[in-house]
Image: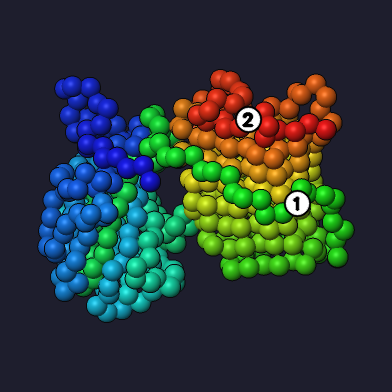
Amino acid sequence: MHRRRRPLVLAVCAGVTVAALAASMTSAFAATIFTDTFSDGDASGWSKSGGTWAVDGAGVFQQSNAGSELARQFAGDTGWTDYAVQARVRPGSFGSSSALVGLAARSTSSTRMYRLALLGSGRAELQAVNGSSVTAIGSAPLGVTTGTWYTLRVEVNGSTIRGFVNGAQIASGSNSLAGAGRIGLVTAYASGGFDDVVVDSSGGGTPTTPPATSTPPTTSSPTAPPPSGWPTPTSSQKVDATIPVSGTFDGGLRRYYGIGDGGQSESQDPMFELAAGATLRNVIIGTPAGDGVHCEGDCTLVNVWWEDVGEDAATFRGGTTYTVDGGGARSASDKVFQHNGPGTVHIRNFQVENAGKLYRACGNCSTSYQRHVVIDNVVVRDTDTIAGINTNWGDTARFSRVTIVGDPDRETSICVKYKGVPKGSEPTKIGEGADGVNCLYSPSDIAYR
């Protein structure tokens, strides 16, 4: 992993104070204003309150005293208002079911804050903490285990407080305990490790500077022969409301249809909504299909077919790793796969016909991330663009074994580069084609027939 440490007052002209930076967090543009990966071996910039803290040889900020009632480290500015804080958190041990390891936002003192806690009971709970008074804003059973890394994120915007674990929202509510405050790393009768802390002003827009650059993902090894024909449905089922999926849903190649009006309206419900870690397989989505499939966290789509894409075939909203393996999509006037969350989308053994774009990294979402796509063993027909990415945010697209059918003039764009913009504006096209940095492919990766 590429690691860096960014000081609190980052990319700010001389004479601009931390207070001015804090005020800027309520502006219309999101920006990454604080990061710490602890790769320099120290925790300067953090202030301790209880516990035994040290950065280990792997660059993880550890709190090792599981007997400490309250161990906390704080950073940032007391004037920060609307922002999101994210960190990777690994519970080491829990002394009881109520022991916790967590992440804090809007901390006004060592005992007053919003806290997203991983509990010894296995649950995740978003809390408003005021001294000994702890109010649960919401919670979810996760089966939290020690020794496992979890990505926690707390978003505070006005009185709205939201908590996410591994990209999936676990709680949201309104609370007026604190309107501003610092970030914090916390444990109570537990030990744990913390890494990759990021603060951004995600309540208002998209980053004005690119996120940290990471190594572009590589193409996976071949797992299946080239895609062939479209399947015949075993039966059809009309759907009147979104089908939630947790775990694995195997449709047995049944056709599901009936959500929405078949158009491009942004307000349509999805046919399937996948919880973090869910798998959808052997499904044919007919028309109308609404907004297709929503992935709220990491997800896997295996042998899923869209006969007539409505708004989008699938939208990747949270999580870090999303896999589309097998299947195909037809008739997408705009795009097939919409990537709104962070991380990498893997599209392999897939076919697309009559589409605007196979993949688009969101260029004007309320929060933007560095996004990646890996496209392998895909057959493309009558499609304008295979992938669209935002190079100013460090997005990458990697291609291998792509076959374009029926395009003798080679009009299909392989990789189109855009300049990402704040929400409410439209991204601008700034180029296309392989460049060895963002659009990654060679002539041998693309075949025409």
Say which residue appears at 66% left-offset and 44% top-offset: 376
Q: Nearer the viewer, residue 322 or 423?
A: 322
Kind of residue at badge 1: Pro
Q: Tag 1, which secondary structure?
A: loop
Mark 1 → mark 2, Cα distance in angstroms: 21 Å
**Cβ atoms under marks 1 and 2 closer than 8 Å:** no
Residue drawn 70% across and 44% down?
377
Label drawn at residue 442: 2
Q: Position of residue 184 (x, y in %)?
A: 23, 54
Q: Do we see residue 334 in this rendering?
A: no
The C terminus - image quarter: top right
| Residue found farthest to the bottom | 96
Amino acid marked by disc 2: Ser
Image position of 361 (left or right of 367): right
Q: Which residue is mark 1?
A: 225
Pick the front one: 298 or 262: 298
Q: Residue 271's spot in the image, x, y percent?
A: 69, 56
